[in-house]
Image: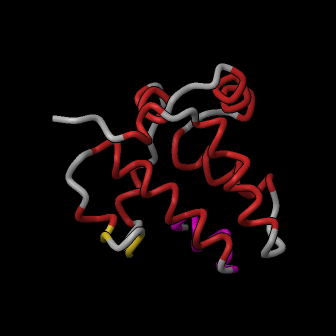
Amino acid sequence: MTTHKIYTMSFAKVYPLYIKKVEKKGRTKSEVDEIIRWLTGYSQEELEVQLEKQTDFETFFAEAPKLNSSRALIKGVICGVRVEEIEESTMQEIRYLDKLIDELAKGKAMEKILRK
């Protein structure tokens, strides 16, 4: 099985793109951080350490302290694929995050994004 290129990509390289995407729509970096913390269980300090270490996506999700059990409620299409149907777990985690960032950029309320 071949490894997807995104698995070895530094999370810190994509992180500013998430922020740029949402800021163009009037949302904030702190909201992006809140989404990431909700999804992964990282504290803000732990998230910043991962960014400093230039951790790759695969390691970022593998070392996540506690993946949120409510992430299974994330449904929809990202990159033409339904996130709930992705079989490979790491790719599904990456696409969950992509979907949440998209929802933030589209103006969805944080309560709904965080499946409260």
92 left or right, relative to 68: left
57 left or right, relative to 112: left
Residue 81 place in picture, x, y as percent: 31, 69
Residue under the point 25% across and 58% down: 86
Residue 91 place in picture, x, y as percent: 34, 48
Using the rendered view, name the quadrant where residue 6 is placed. Answer: top left
Residue under the point 45% across and 47% down: 68
Using the rendered view, name the quadrant where residue 12 is placed. Answer: top right
Residue under the point 73% across and 48% down: 16
Q: Nearer the viewer, residue 83 or 56?
A: 56
Residue 68 drawn above or below residue 85:
above
Locate the N terminus by quadrant. top left
Q: Nearer the viewer, residue 91 or 70?
A: 91
Residue 89 place in picture, x, y as percent: 28, 44
Is 109 in the magenta? yes
In the current view of this chain or complex, which residue is farthest to the bottom? 107
Residue 62 place in picture, x, y as percent: 40, 29
Q: Nearer the viewer, residue 113 or 79?
A: 79
Q: How is the rendered protein coloured?
A: secondary structure
Question: What is the magenta range?
Answer: 107-115
- What count of labels does the image hold? 0
Residue 23 drawn above or below residue 12:
below
In the current view of this chain or complex, which residue is farthest to the left? 1
15 left or right, relative to 41: right
Is 43 in the magenta? no
Residue under the point 58% across and 49% down: 38
Locate the C terminus by quadrant. bottom right
